[in-house]
């Protein structure tokens, strides 16, 4: 996720506990979705998890953009 912002993500992980929580939650949901797909879980549940994951991805992206603006990057 956001490979082009790898350096900024590393910095945010060092400095921002909230960023770490959101980033890790996104990754956990990704793994859970993959497991749900493998186990042929209910499609509505999978779609709900995908929407939750997308929201977290948006949150991560917004934190990256904010960091870039604040640090003139």
Image (spheres, rainbow, N blue to C red):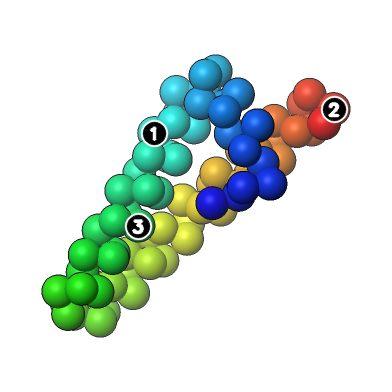
Residue 29 horizontal side relative to residue 51, left or right? left
What element does badge 1 sit on?
helix
Which residue is at 75% across, 33% downward? Answer: 68
Mark 3 in CB contact with mark 1 (< 8 angstroms)? no
- Measure the C-alpha gap from mark 2 to mark 3: 31 Å
The residue singled out by tag 1 in the image is 21
The location of residue 26, given as percent across then percent down, is 40, 49
For the residue carrying disc 1, how many other residues have a C-alpha within 10 Å: few (<14), some (14-19), or many (20+)?
few
The location of residue 20, given as percent across then percent down, is 44, 31
The residue singled out by tag 2 in the image is 72
Q: Looking at this view, is 27 or 50 the one in front? A: 27
Q: Earlier in the sequence, mark 2 or mark 3?
A: 3
Q: Which mark is residue 64?
A: none
**In front: label 2 or label 3:** 3
- Measure the C-alpha gap from mark 1 to mark 2: 25 Å
For the residue carrying disc 3, how many other residues have a C-alpha within 10 Å: few (<14), some (14-19), or many (20+)?
some
Q: Earlier in the sequence, mark 1 or mark 2?
A: 1
Which residue is at 58% across, 34% downward? Answer: 9
Q: Is residue 10 above or below residue 60?
A: above
Residue placed furthest toward the right: 72
For the residue carrying disc 2, how many other residues have a C-alpha within 10 Å: few (<14), some (14-19), or many (20+)?
few
Residue 26 horizontal side relative to residue 37, left or right? right
Quadrant in which residue 8 is drawn: top right
Q: Which mark is residue 30?
A: 3
Which residue is at 65% across, 31% downward? Answer: 7
Quadrant in which residue 69 is drawn: top right
What element does badge 3 sit on?
helix
Q: Quadrant of the C terminus?
A: top right
């Amino acid at each position: 996720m956001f490979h082009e912002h790898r350096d900024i993500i590393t910095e945010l992980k060092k400095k921002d506990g909230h960023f770490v929580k959101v980033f890790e939650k996104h990754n956990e949901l990704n793994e859970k979705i993959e497991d749900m797909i493998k186990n042929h879980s209910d499609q509505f549940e999978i779609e709900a998890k995908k929407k939750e994951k997308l929201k977290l991805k948006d949150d991560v992206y917004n934190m990256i953009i904010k960091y870039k603006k604040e640090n003139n990057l």
